[in-house]
């Protein structure tokens, strides 16, 4: 009832104005919905999380594959509009179940119903504005197609007479000949009968839609052999090749290819027997497909048979293609090849040049295949390609590592991590920072495997580079008031007293008031007339004495700081907001850092919030990670076994520091400026 009402509302939107030809009796509103189509529509609108197991099986089976929680489902009117459009494309009076499935392919992301199969009935025109003569010719042609389709040899002459001036090579509205339809069905007897009757083996599906309005865009320039290969009919393919069909389909020698060759389709389908047969007959796996605007389909180049097999994960087919001997190219160089070679070579070098050019072309094809196998998650195929010497690109390596990690394939992860150093540094792009580092640190966090941790440490150290860690720079102390060291802790001349660990320390307001905001706040809370002491907690007396000595002497040059006092002095400098003294302590820590104390220094710096020293420690970790990864204190810092610190934050900080380093060394306009 809802569909009927919706169709009623759609009718005025799609009403066609009568033309000068025969009146059009069939209107959009009179389309009939088959019961199976209504059931299919109801299914898709009520069960968005389900998908078809195989929509071509009768009765169709439905299984819960993966949940697909669509937030907003398409409205009923949109379902009907798209389904009716598919029915109209077929020139059909009725909407069937497959029309609804094709609508689902467009309206529900992730639902993958198979495309409608080509059928002989689809070529018959149900409704067109034709005059009487054209209508009669059309019905005769339709009848001729039906007579040829029945397989009776005694009707061939009559059928040819009905098909029109082109006879046995007449084309339907889909631009297909009777031989092509026979190849789609795999009817070997019919194919032989049509060949005996003189059918053109190499006729192509036309590319124009003016005379043939229902041509499928994907089938343009396809031949009968292409259709037979597409549907996997090996006896028909053998028959066509024996009869002299072109093994490359419609492709002419030297021209750019804008449609798939039979070998490409067989490789994509993974049909090993068909691939072997086509290769025996001379098919070239190096031929690729270009977009119709002349732009290649992929970033690497043409989508050839190697790429088709790799993109679909067919290892046996890929190995078969790889074992095929290379064809020698002609001696005529294209402009692109001339520019690539750089200069002209003498005639004596022609033979080596051909081999070199073939090798370059095959290497390019294998690089593209490697890209597609990695992009589609077929790591085994990617490793096979790598094993024959094809170099890694950063993208293919990262995608392979990501897939291996998602599939929990530890040996493969170890193999890939070992291969990282083979990637050229020129390949280091923004992808390494945005995709690679998060992935590798996630593996480090999740694996807890010693071998993988060691391999990742090698990679991080390699990425950090051989340059030294950026040094910390002293802060020049501003010119402030200073007193003679004789006044340091002098009771007779002082006007303020601090109480540190129960011991008095005498100082002068005039010096401390401008030393830092912290001292100013302490002195402001005690008027000058108040003789009480200012108590200082959490700072030891010797440390406080060093702080005062720094202020009275006007610098850190005269300070004698012991190794066991540097951390406490850093804390005191941070507490009293003495930036120059704090930086001086940071520099001392940085100079004294080693594999034994680096974790303690880092924890102390993070606790105090000293970012520069923390960053220096992170650089030290990355530069020496191969040694530190075996240190228990460092492991505890990374993995946070006792929960004292946030291990995840440490890994994030290391990732951020390494990203900054890579950006400076490899990606910035002034490379290496940070070092």
Image (spheres, rainbow, N blue to C red):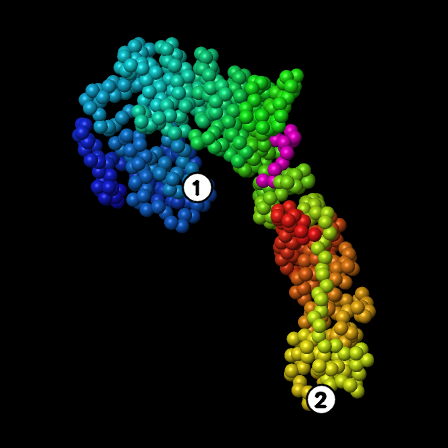
Q: Secondary structure at mark 1?
A: loop
Instruction: Tell me where residue 658 appears, x and y as whole percent.
Output: 65, 51
Residue with the mark numbered 1: 110
Q: Confirm or deny contact between disc 1 and disc 2 (CB under 8 A).
A: no
Instruction: Tell me where residue 470 appears, x and y as whole percent.
Output: 70, 55
Q: Which quarter shows the N terminus?
A: top left
Left or right: residue 56 compared with residue 606: left
Is residue 146 visible in the rendered image? The answer is: yes
Quarter assignment of residue 300: top right
In this picture, which residue range is highlighted in magenta? Answer: 384-395
Rendered image: mark on residue 531: 2
- The structure residue drawn at horizontal position 66% and vertical position 85%, both measured from the top left corner, is 526
- The structure residue drawn at horizontal position 71% and vertical position 82%, both measured from the top left corner, is 509
Left or right: residue 1 compared with residue 399: left
Number of other residues with Cα within 10 Å of mark 2, as a class: few under 14, some 14 to 19, many 20 or more: few
Is 195 in front, or is 42? 195
Instruction: Tell me where residue 392 appears, x and y as whole percent.
Output: 63, 36
As for residue 111 lying within the magenta part, the answer is: no
- The structure residue drawn at horizontal position 35% and vertical position 42%, both measured from the top left corner, is 43
Number of other residues with Cα within 10 Å of mark 1, as a class: few under 14, some 14 to 19, many 20 or more: few
Rendered image: mark on residue 548: none
Give above or below for 640 relative to 462: below
Is residue 449 visible in the rendered image? The answer is: no
Gap between marks 1 and 2, in whole Å?
A: 80 Å
Instruction: Tell me where residue 600 appears, x and y as whole percent.
Output: 73, 61
Say which of marks 1 and 2 sits in front. 2
Quarter assignment of residue 205: top left
Is 267 in front, or is 488? 488
- The structure residue drawn at horizontal position 58% and vertical position 45%, both measured from the top left corner, is 431
As for residue 390 lying within the magenta part, the answer is: yes
Give above or below for 4 relative to 91: below
Disc with the residue nearer the chain's start (1 vs 2):
1
């Amino acid at each position: 009832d809802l569909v009927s009402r919706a169709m009623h509302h759609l009718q005025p939107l799609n009403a066609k104005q009568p033309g000068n030809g025969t009146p059009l009796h069939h209107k959009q509103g009179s389309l009939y919905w088959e019961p199976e189509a209504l059931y299919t529509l109801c299914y898709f609108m009520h069960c968005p999380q389900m998908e078809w197991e195989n929509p071509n099986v009768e009765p169709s089976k439905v299984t819960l594959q993966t949940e697909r929680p669509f937030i907003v489902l398409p409205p009923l009117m949109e379902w009907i509009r798209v389904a009716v459009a598919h029915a109209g494309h077929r020139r059909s009076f009725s909407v069937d179940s497959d029309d609804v499935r094709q609508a689902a392919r467009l309206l529900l992301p992730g639902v993958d119903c198979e495309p409608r199969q080509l059928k002989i009935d689809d070529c018959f025109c149900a409704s067109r504005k034709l005059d009487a003569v054209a209508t009669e010719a059309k019905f005769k042609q339709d009848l001729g197609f039906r007579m040829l389709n029945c397989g009776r040899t005694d009707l061939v002459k009559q059928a040819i007479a009905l098909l029109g001036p082109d006879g046995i090579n007449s084309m339907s509205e889909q631009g297909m000949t009777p031989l092509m339809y026979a190849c789609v069905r795999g009817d070997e007897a019919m194919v032989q009968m049509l060949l005996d009757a003189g059918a053109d083996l190499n006729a192509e599906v036309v590319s124009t839609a003016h005379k043939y309005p229902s041509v499928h865009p994907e089938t343009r320039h396809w031949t009968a052999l292409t259709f037979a290969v597409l549907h996997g009919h090996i006896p028909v393919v053998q028959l066509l090749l024996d009869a002299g069909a072109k093994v490359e389909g419609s492709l002419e020698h030297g021209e750019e290819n804008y449609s798939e060759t039979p070998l490409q389709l067989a490789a994509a389908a993974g049909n090993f027997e068909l691939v072997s047969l086509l290769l025996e007959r001379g098919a070239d796996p190096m031929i690729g497909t270009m977009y119709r605007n002349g732009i290649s389909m992929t970033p690497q180049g043409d989508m050839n048979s190697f790429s088709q097999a790799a993109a679909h994960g067919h290892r046996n087919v890929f190995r078969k293609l790889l074992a095929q001997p290379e064809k020698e190219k002609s001696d005529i160089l294209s402009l692109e090849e001339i520019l690539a070679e750089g200069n002209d070579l003498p005639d004596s070098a022609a033979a080596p040049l051909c081999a070199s050019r073939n090798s370059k072309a095959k290497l390019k094809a294998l690089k593209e295949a490697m890209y597609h196998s990695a992009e589609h998650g077929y790591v085994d195929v990617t490793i096979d390609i790598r094993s024959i010497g094809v170099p890694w690109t950063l993208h293919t390596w990262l995608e392979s590592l990501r897939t291996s990690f998602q599939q929990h394939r530890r040996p493969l992860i170890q193999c890939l991590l070992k291969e990282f150093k083979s990637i050229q540094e020129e390949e280091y792009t923004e992808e390494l920072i945005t995709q690679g580092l998060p992935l590798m640190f996630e593996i480090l966090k999740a694996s807890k495997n010693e071998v993988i941790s060691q391999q990742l440490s090698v990679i991080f150290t390699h990425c950090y580079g051989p340059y030294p860690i950026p040094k910390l720079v002293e802060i020049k102390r501003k010119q402030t008031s200073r007193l003679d060291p004789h006044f340091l802790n002098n009771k007779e001349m002082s006007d303020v007293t601090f109480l540190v660990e129960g011991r008095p320390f005498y100082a002068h307001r005039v010096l401390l008031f401008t030393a830092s905001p912290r001292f100013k706040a302490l002195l402001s809370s005690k008027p000058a007339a108040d003789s009480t002491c200012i108590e200082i907690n959490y700072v030891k007396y010797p440390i406080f004495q060093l702080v005062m000595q720094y202020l009275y002497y006007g610098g850190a040059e005269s300070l004698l700081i012991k190794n066991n006092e540097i951390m406490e002095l850093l804390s005191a400098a941070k507490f009293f907001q003495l930036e120059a003294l704090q930086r001086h302590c940071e520099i001392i820590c940085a100079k004294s850092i080693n594999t034994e104390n680096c974790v303690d220094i880092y924890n102390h710096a993070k606790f105090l919030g000293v970012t520069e020293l923390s960053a220096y420690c992170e650089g030290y970790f990355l530069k020496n990670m191969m040694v530190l990864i075996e240190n228990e204190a460092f492991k505890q810092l990374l993995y946070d076994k006792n929960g004292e610190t946030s291990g995840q934050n440490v890994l994030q900080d290391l990732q951020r520091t390494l990203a900054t380093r890579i950006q400076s060394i490899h990606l910035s306009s002034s490379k290496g400026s940070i070092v």
